[in-house]
Amino acid sequence: MNGVHDMGGMHCMGPIQYEKNEPVFHAAWEGRIYALNRAMRAWRKWNLDTDRHALELMPPADYLRMSYYERWVGRLADQVVQYGLVTSEEMESGKPAPGAPKVAPALTAAMSSGFLTRGILSSRDPKVQPLFKVGQRVRARNINPASHTRLPRYARGRTGTVMRDHGVYSFPDTNAHFLGEKRQHVYSVRFASRELWGEGASPRDFVHIDMWDDYLERP
Amino acid sequence: MARSKTGPVGRRGFLKGAAASAAALVAEPRVGNAQEPQNHDHDHQAVPSDLTLRVKALESLLVEKGLVDPAALDALVDTFEHKVGPRNGARVVARAWVDPAYKKRLVTNAAAAIAELGYTSGQGEHMVAVENGPKVHNLVVCTLCSCYPWPVLGLPPVWYKSAPYRSRAVIDPRGVLREFGLQLEGDVEVRVWDSTAELRYLVLPERPAGTANMTEDELAALITRDAMVGVAKVAAPRPGVSA
């Protein structure tokens, strides 16, 4: 979707605010909401792509106004109701419904270190054939879905070169909407900055973007 | 502006009963600046913020329902506050500087080379190391969200996730680097890596001059997070300080 999250190339966002000796979390609640998100995803009612898409659906003004972890608070509260883990009455009152059964957590303390080391799916799958080769010229498709995509606006319709085949990954555009993993090859595609931004860009600048097969076509 | 911390965060008025009643007991919530990076509550404030109360209420509901184990949350917070961070990445870079065979493995199969040193975790299974040189400078960004190589650098700083950095790193990388105090010569090639998929990028900075006699540990101490994201170079040791 063409949301405000897709920021590459926008102007007027102000200077970069650098904080020296920045703490990992700026307040205890940031660490708790970070951990709650990780722990609740272990229920496997939603995935990383739905997580990302949920933030993209926020009204743009809210997205820009809220801090990073503040966005996560509303997202998690919405998700647990939307995916049936908590009722809206429980969310209103902050208390479990009378007589509601207590479940066992999906993620225990003992598991949580293993949870960190458990990899995402292997990127090697010989059954999935690549549609493009290293060295090949490719064009990013000009698509504008109102749904989730990881093809940034600034690259659409632009031509680049496949530099590396990273193997096979789930396709976020379908996975975010529970329409299947549609596993396919992801490539590092190199775009000249002048192709992306015009003659004003330095001829020695390049942007490398990771692209799924479905984002690419022959120029 | 005043509504920035008082309106409901979600689309439903969630946890009104729990958080709002507690919030009513405290004074005016602290109002953040509209600019994203400063929009953080700090835990040194005298009264709990609205977000503190909301997250507490959400956690207690999820714990009471048995959906989360508070000890698992403690373990996750502890991991990212104390166990994972840029010191891991610095060990990887220092090893690559002193061991050419390791460096070769790092740039061809970064995930395996990083795992050799014992660093693995979420968001880092598919690592890519990109090497700086006299005429090549690499810079990492995630324009769409906040993707970052957790196992080697920990969680990203606020500026990395902020609109100013995400918007400009791809269109004006040299301007961004100048803002960080790094002026590149015109003949240096700039490679920006936009982390749009599940690949995570680590910049392998150049080893500075004057470090020939330093040990791997001494080298690791020179290597900064910023250099491994590509917004800085590793500075040469100050004369007389070490080596």
Image (cartoon, helix red, strand yellow):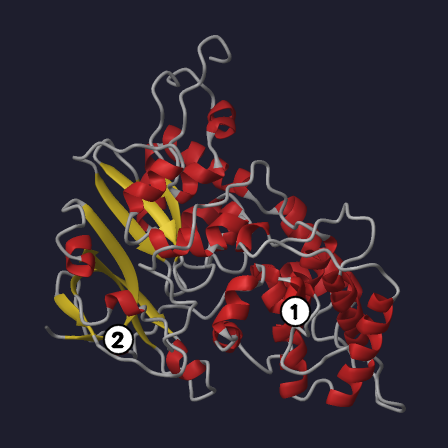
With A185 as the anchor, is A179 left or right in this view? right
Where does residue B57 sit, x and y in percent of width and height? 80, 70
Where does residue A24 sit, x and y in percent of width and height? 62, 47
Q: Nearer the viewer, residue A132 or A126?
A: A132
Name the disc covering residue A215, or none. Answer: 2
Q: Earlier in the sequence, mark 1 or mark 2?
A: 1
* Residue type (three-letter) at the residue carrying disc 2: Tyr
Residue A144 vertical placement versus A11 (above, below): below
Q: Which residue is mark 1?
A: A73
Q: Quadrant of the N terminus of chain A?
A: bottom left
Q: Nearer the viewer, residue B155 or A153?
A: A153
Residue B168 vertical placement versus A40 (above, below): above
* Residue type (three-letter) at the residue carrying disc 1: Val
With B232 as the anchor, is B69 left or right in this view? right
For the point 48% across and 39% down, the residue is B225
Q: Nearer the viewer, residue B105 or A86?
A: A86
